[in-house]
Amino acid sequence: MNNSKVLSTLGLAHRASLVISGEDLVLEAIRSGRAKVVFLASDAGASTSKRIHDKTTFYQVPLLSLFPGEALSHAVGKANRKVMCINDPKMAKLLLQTANEEKEVK
């Protein structure tokens, strides 16, 4: 799944400056309504996972936890990224559709 279309699209979104990364910045984006979809590394720590899961549930933001932190970091070309979000509705819709298609194939 490392050659995933989701990761490729996430890299494209990062190059287009549509990605916010880092726990504090993502939490602020969720609270302010800018976050359209949140990516959480499957190997993120328990406290980070709980905080992000609680905020996305409360604010009704889709949460994808499909990939380990290494794959997410590699996709955006930055080291040690565990949490990131997309702030563009069209790109978020594309990423969610692609993720759903990949789930159906497996």
Image (cartoon, rainbow, N blue to C red):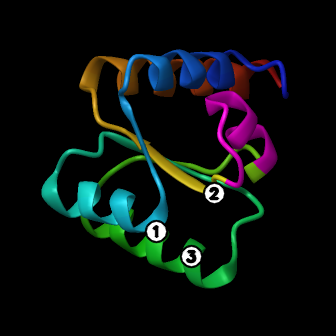
**Residue 2 to residue 52: above or below:** above
Label 3 sits on a secondary structure element that is helix
Given residues 25 and 63, the one toward you in this image is: 25
Pointers 2 and 3 in contact (CB under 8 A)? yes
> Which residue is label 2 attached to?
82
User: In which quarter of the view is residue 43 placed?
Assistant: bottom right
Query: Between disc 2 and disc 3, whose residue precedes?
Result: 3
User: Cα distance, mark 2 to mark 1?
Assistant: 11 Å
Graded by Cα atoms within 10 Å as few (under 14), some (14 to 19) or many (20 or more), the crowding at tag 2 reads: many
* Callout 1 secondary element: helix
CB under 8 Å between callouts 2 and 1? no
Three-letter amino acid code of the residue under disc 1: Ile
Q: Is residue 57 above or below residue 50?
A: above
Label 2: which secondary element: loop
- 38 shown above or below 22: above
* Image x and y of residue 58, in percent: 28, 69
* Main secondary structure of the magenta stretch: helix
Real-space Cα distance between discs 1 and 3?
6 Å
The C terminus is located in which quarter? top right
Q: Nearer the viewer, residue 1 or 85?
A: 85
Contact between labelled residues 3 and 1, with CB atoms less than 8 Å apart: yes
Give the residue at mark 1. 52
Q: Locate residue 60, reporting x and y percent.
A: 28, 56
Q: Residue at x 58, y 72 (%)?
A: 49
Residue stretch in magenta? 70-80
Tell me the CA gap for discs 2 and 3. Answer: 9 Å
